[in-house]
């Protein structure tokens, strides 16, 4: 942060370089803790499938866990509306102080939850309610932190200053990985399953206290103070943001031409890569955490690189370049992960043809007591979760489902027969650590996180500059959280369902590829560059 100017002037007061640095550090530390809270569940979602959802169908339980995971993302835009309005009416500092309290309490309560074995379907219900509270809080947090830092930053260094906030989501995920890995490494698997998984959530208590203390020391942003003293605050920020032209046009363009693509690239390069390696490539959790964690450490400085670069060449072209490059390379990159992490699985897929001849197959996204799992669904779920590619054929007999694994034919659904068939045909149940090419696997993961830094590093400055101060918190928060919470947050859930239905572990990649290409086209044609906007000189 040494590159920040010593001082700069706003219309209301002079902000020193030391104050600017203090604002960045204080905002970033609190936001790291909040992302840590939010992503604890995301990382443990596959593990929680067995704790909080009905037993008997592993992929259905996994989809249920991902559904609760997605609930926290789906609610985020509503948090953006609620807290964005408060932030534009009351102030930036007060609002994101409230959001961190809500997030911290919700996370701690997860650590005290009863499991499905104890309270039945009440367990996933409680879990979803707490995830909704987390999502509401996060919906107000990011817009507040980004706006607060941007309104303290010098105009010509705003991309660099706000890129520190952009590191927080990745650092929060890294912190969650480290704490979870330490707990799992330091105790037996049975202990972690029984009670050890609660420790990372309890760890939020001291983090919450530290965050509240830091944020209580902050002052309101100079731009908001000027608006308040001049009586220029919006009296109806929701209406002014979404029902008045041209601001409603900018909201739509920010979503479709920037944040939607940015969201899917973020979640593909970090979370979906994590789930893909664990679920489909069958690498144990500790080496998976190490691979992902190291990629985050190595690539995180590029948030600052691309944030600073956006101050020189613009935000738009970096974001859209990241979307395009990611869309064009995801298939070879994920195939490369299979090749370098589990070559035995790659060989098995190539040498063992699998067909599923069936009727009554369904596409399941949200799994619950209302879901009807047919024999076809169970067979496809089992094969998909095993990381296997198969061909779906229309039924030619009276059987619900006939599965052929190599030369072995199985009629109906019987999990024991499926496992025996895989064993007889040489299926590798786990990745062989001695055959993993760690360097090449790590290189692929670092490349995907660098894509993340390209699309995410400049996005905060872009969104802040796109909207006027009087409705900035509200206007920028909604497209950001729809892009990240809906387009990005739904990715693991949709991709998992797509894989199970299509019979191809790479098929789920079509979702982020199509969204990223859509953003590239719309952003290229209709979104304007914002780097030369001078928010400290704008007329209120």
Image (spheres, rainbow, N blue to C red):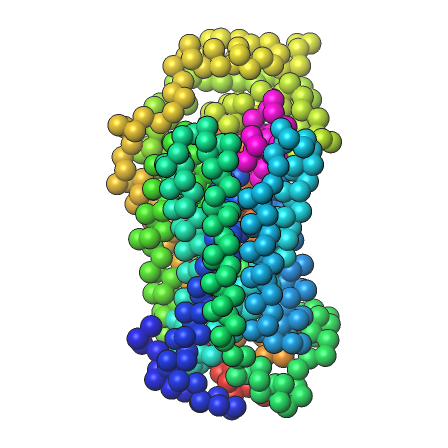
Q: Main secondary structure of the magenta part?
A: helix
Residue 48 located within the stretch drawn in magenta: yes
User: Can residue 513 be seen at all in this image of the molecule?
Assistant: no
Q: Quadrant of residue 406 in the image? A: top left
The residue drawn where x is 66% and y is 71% is 86
> Between 45 and 207, which is closer to the camera in this rendering?
207
From the top left corner, tell me how far across and down residue 424 is, in percent.
42, 10
Q: Is residue 83 above or below residue 504?
A: below
* Lateral position of residue 326 relative to residue 442, left or right: right
* Lateral position of residue 395 relative to residue 307, left or right: right
From the top left corner, tell me how far across and down residue 149 is, in percent.
48, 73
From the top left corner, tell me how far across and down residue 76 is, in percent.
62, 56
Q: Is residue 134 above or below residue 412?
A: below
> Between 72 and 499, which is closer to the camera in this rendering?
72
> Between 245 and 148, which is closer to the camera in this rendering?
148
The residue drawn where x is 47% and y is 10% is 420
Residue 506 located within the stretch drawn in magenta: no
User: Can residue 117 be seen at all in this image of the molecule?
Assistant: yes
The residue range painted magenta reads 47-66
Q: Is residue 37 above or below residue 47?
A: below
């Amino acid at each position: 942060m040494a590159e920040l100017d010593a001082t700069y002037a706003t219309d209301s007061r002079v902000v020193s370089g030391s104050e600017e640095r203090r604002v960045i550090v204080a905002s970033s530390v609190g936001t790291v803790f909040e992302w840590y809270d939010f992503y604890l569940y995301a990382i443990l979602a596959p593990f929680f499938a067995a704790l909080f959802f009905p037993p008997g169908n592993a992929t259905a339980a996994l989809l249920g866990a991902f559904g609760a995971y997605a609930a926290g993302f789906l609610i985020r835009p509503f948090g953006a509306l609620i807290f964005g309005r408060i932030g534009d009416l009351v102030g930036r500092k007060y609002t994101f102080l409230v959001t961190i309290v809500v997030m911290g309490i919700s996370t701690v309560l997860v650590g005290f939850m009863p499991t499905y074995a104890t309270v039945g379907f009440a367990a996933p219900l409680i879990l979803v309610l707490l995830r909704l509270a987390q999502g509401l809080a996060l919906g107000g947090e990011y817009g507040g932190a980004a706006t607060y830092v941007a309104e303290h930053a010098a105009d010509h260094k705003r991309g660099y200053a706000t890129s520190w906030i952009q590191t927080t989501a990745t650092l929060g995920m890294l912190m969650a990985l480290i704490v979870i890995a330490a707990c799992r490494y330091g105790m037996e698997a049975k202990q972690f399953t029984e009670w050890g998984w609660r420790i990372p959530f309890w760890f939020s208590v001291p983090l919450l206290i530290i965050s509240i203390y830091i944020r209580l020391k902050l002052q309101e942003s100079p731009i908001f103070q000027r608006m308040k003293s001049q009586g220029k605050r919006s009296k109806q920020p929701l209406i002014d943001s979404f029902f008045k032209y041209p601001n409603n046009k900018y909201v739509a363009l920010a979503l479709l031409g920037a944040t939607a693509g940015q969201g899917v690239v973020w979640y593909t390069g970090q979370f979906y890569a994590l789930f893909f390696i664990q679920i489909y490539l069958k690498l144990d959790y500790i080496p998976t955490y190490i691979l992902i964690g190291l990629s985050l450490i190595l690539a995180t400085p590029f948030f600052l690189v691309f944030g600073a670069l956006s101050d020189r060449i613009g935000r738009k072209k970096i974001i859209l370049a990241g979307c395009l490059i990611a869309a064009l390379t995801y298939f070879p990159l994920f195939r490369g992960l299979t090749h370098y992490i589990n070559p035995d699985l790659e060989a098995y897929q190539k040498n063992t043809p699998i067909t599923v001849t069936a009727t009554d197959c369904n596409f399941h996204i949200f799994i619950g007591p209302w879901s009807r799992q047919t024999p076809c669904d169970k067979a496809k779920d089992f094969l998909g979760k095993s990381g296997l590619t198969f061909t779906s054929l229309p039924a030619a007999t009276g059987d619900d489902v006939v599965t052929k694994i190599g030369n072995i034919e199985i009629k109906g659904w019987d999990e024991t027969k499926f496992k025996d068939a895989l064993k007889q045909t040489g299926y590798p149940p786990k990745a062989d650590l001695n055959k993993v090419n760690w360097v090449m696997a790590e290189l692929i993961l670092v490349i995907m996180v660098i894509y993340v830094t390209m699309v995410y590093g400049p996005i905060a400055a872009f969104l802040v500059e796109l909207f006027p101060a009087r409705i900035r918190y509200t206007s920028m928060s909604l497209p950001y959280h729809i892009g990240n919470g809906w387009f990005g947050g739904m990715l693991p859930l949709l991709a998992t369902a797509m894989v199970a239905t299509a019979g191809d572990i790479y098929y789920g990649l079509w979702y982020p590829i199509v969204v990223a290409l859509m953003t590239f086209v719309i952003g290229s044609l209709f979104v304007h560059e914002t780097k030369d906007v001078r928010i400290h000189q704008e007329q209120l």
